[in-house]
Every structure is written in C-alpha cells, then in structure tokens.
Amino acid sequence: MPMQKPKFDGQIDKFKKYFSRKKQSIDEVVREPTAGGIVFRRNKKGDVEILLIQDAKDRWTIPKGHIEEGETAQETALREIGEEAGITEAEAVCWLGKIHFRYRRVSTLVLMTTQIYLVKALGDTDNIKKEEWMNGIKWFKFHDALEAIEYEDIGKLMLLAMKKIRQQGL
C-alpha cells in the first residue's frame, strides 16, 4: 500500500514563517518606578465606588504613572490621579502595597514596580475627565470594578482597599 501524504503537507510553508520567526534579543533592562491609586468615593446611597480608566488596549485599570525626580511615590499617585482623571481634591489614606509588571519594548525589557495607595476622592467627584489616550473612565460599584479590572494583582489590592475602607469607617 503506498504511503499517503499528510493532509496539511501543502500548508507547511505557510506555517514555517510563524515558527521560524525569532524575537529580537534583549539589549537592555530598564527599571521604571511608578505609582498610582485605588480611588474611591461613596455614592448618594453610601455605596463604595471605584474609579477605573480604560487604556488604549481596552483594559480597565487604575490611574498610575512614572515617579518623577524629587517626587515621592505618594505625590506621584496623587498627581497622576489629577492628570489622568481630573480629581485634584483627594486624600491618600494609606499605602496598600506594590505590584510588579514586566514587558518588552522592542529590544528593551522593562521592569516596572508600581506603588499603590488607597485614595479618597473629595470635592466634585462627578467631574472626571478622560485623557485623549484613554478609551474610557468610569466610577464602578466595588464588585463591578473587581470584575472589570484586568490585572489580578490590582484586584487583590482592591480587596485590601475595601477592607481598609470598612475598618476605618471611610
């Protein structure tokens, strides 16, 4: 009995380009310290709401950004919340922890450490603004924010934030 060719034999050349493509090697490693905040408020019913922003890749996350020279992590978190969300009246309640991200930027490996604070929004909390690079910004009920958040590490800190809000009667 003659040997039959596999059905996918003619498609092998199509797939070779996917398997033979090599990633560019990493030429440098860069550390980027950042800070941000889990921003909360109480709505008219007294329920806790969390402010999330939707990035350019449609991922819901918290306001955060790079720590500038001479700035503390807490100052950065409050500045970034003001810049990214328009919330300029806010109080850093406490430090919640830090999370680590890593990603590639062409031939650079970026190691990002983000200090996260629990931040209470004060004043006119309805007057939030979306920056041009964002796809959205919104106040979520706590459980909806937990569902929407794209990063597991931030979700864990959101649970800690809710615990602190309850413990401190905020």
Image (cartoon, grey):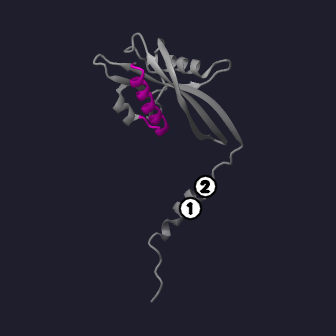
Which mark, by number, is residue 21? 2
Counting from the top left corner in percent of width and height, residue 85 is at 46, 19
Amino acid under disc 2: Arg
Tell me the quarter of the image containing the N terminus.
bottom left
Q: How many marks?
A: 2
Q: Position of residue 48 (x, y in %)?
A: 35, 23
- Cβ–Cβ under 8 Å for marks 1 and 2: no
Q: Is residue 44 left or right of residue 166?
A: left
- Callout 2: 10 Å neighbours few (<14), some, many (20+)? few
Magenta part, dominant SS = helix
- The residue positioned 63% from the left and 38% from the top of the image is 110
Residue at 60% across / 55% down in the picture?
A: 21
Furthest residue toward front: 167
Bounds of the magenta segment = 149-169
Look at the numbered disc 1 and give the secondary structure of its residue.
helix
114 vs 93, left or right, is right
Q: Secondary structure at mark 2?
A: loop
Magenta stretch: includes residue 167: yes
Whether residue 43 is visible, yes or no, is yes
The kind of residue on which mark 1 rests is Lys
x and y, in percent, of residue 162 in the image: 41, 28
In this rendering, the answer to whether 90 lies above or below 2 is: above
Disc assigned to residue 16: 1
Seen in the picture, residue 153 relative to 90 is either above or below; the reply is below
Residue 34 is covered by the magenta coloring: no
Residue 126 drawn at (x, y percent): 37, 15
Task: Please tell me in which quadrant of the rendered image residue 70 appears.
Answer: top right
Structural crowding at the residue carrying mark 1, measured as other residues with C-alpha within 10 Å and reported as few (<14), some (14–19) or many (≥20): few
